[in-house]
Image: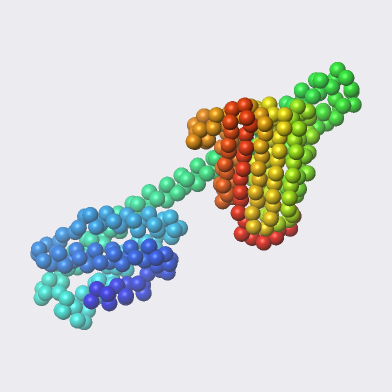
Amino acid sequence: MIDHLYARYEERLAYALLERRDLRAEWRRQFGYVFDDCLRSLKVGRVVVNDDKVALASLLGVSTALSGIPLDKLTLAWGEMIDVFLSGLTGFGAGRLLPTGRTQLALSAINRSVVERSRISSVWYEKALLKKLEGLRTADRKRAARELHDWFGSNISLALRKLELHNLATESKESFSRRHIEDLHSILGNLFEGVRRLSSGLRLQTPVSNIDRELRSYVDAYGLDLTDVTIFVDGDETDVPSHVRGEVFLVLRECLRNIFTHAGAGQALVMLQLSASRVCAVVQDDGRGFASSSDAFGPRTGSGLISMKERIRALGGSFTITSVPMNGTRIAFLVPLTDGPHDLV
């Protein structure tokens, strides 16, 4: 009898509620729990509901919310459950299941059991939805923090470096000084455009067509003669989606900025391998390094390292950092790709 009733119930459920195997199994269990409440109520002669089993309806609420299924479909599913039980227990052949004169008690038990489950699942649906929205807000705040640090931080750092070079150049070559002022004007223009785009909710970066060229341009613009930078790029950049190229460039540029600003390195090496299946990179220097604990991203970690890690993780990749005091730092990351070749944007 119970299997027959549930088969009828599944016919009425929205496909989205049955598409996931865990959701489908949970609806089957809840249907059985309601039936158990009915039988127990008939046995003791009054309406009783197993509160422990009712609490499990919270799983349906959470799973439904996280699956993006509207709340009204969840509520309708509980209503359909009552209707199936009502038609099954009062229709032809119901006498084989219910003792004479006990139909009202059975239906009262079913109604209370289902209503309690509907209430619990709805409460947890809303909790899960709020948690999901909170997670999205947190992710958006982190994205904004990354953009502020990687875009504005790098450009402001470069602008300050240009001012330093200008001050040095004014004492020697006027034309050399003028070039730095022109570069500074361009950098400040980029910063202004970044503010405009950020205020309108857009990502700050523009597509990077050639990571090798952009990295060399950044190194030249920084004008730091104390660190000898070697850059190797292997592979065809058209194999890599434009948004991945942009994120990889920002991470590599941040690596170089950290080397120029903090490492005091004499040598720095950037190795980048690109293919249709993955992007691999290693950046290492012979600078002062730092004490790398088991948790290289603890609360005292700089925002630059955290930003780099988050960008690579957002692409589904892995990010590792190894450093020894006075013996340099090594950063490596890998980003798997699933799509085929991509034209440059």
Q: Nearer the viewer, residue 137 or 321?
A: 321
Instruction: Find residue 113 and report its horizontal and vertical position in percent.
Output: 23, 61
Residue 47, compared with residue 287, is above or below; it is below
Q: Nearer the viewer, residue 229 or 50?
A: 229
* Residue at the (19%, 81%) spot, across then down: 93
Instruction: Find residue 19 and report its horizontal and vertical position in percent.
Output: 43, 67
Q: Quarter-wise, where is residue 41 in the image?
A: bottom left
Indicate left or right for 48 with 272 as reference. Answer: left
Instruction: Find residue 95 and report its horizontal and vertical position in percent.
Output: 15, 79
* Residue at the (20%, 76%) spot, across then down: 90
Residue 305, compared with residue 83, is above or below; it is above
Q: Tell me if I can see residue 158 in this picture.
A: no
- Quarter of the picture containing the N terminus is bottom left
Instruction: Find residue 196 and report its horizontal and vertical position in percent.
Output: 68, 39
Indicate left or right for 88 with 277 as reference. Answer: left
Q: Tell me if I can see residue 228 in this picture.
A: yes
Q: Residue furthest top?
A: 171
Q: Quarter-wise, where is residue 170 in the image?
A: top right
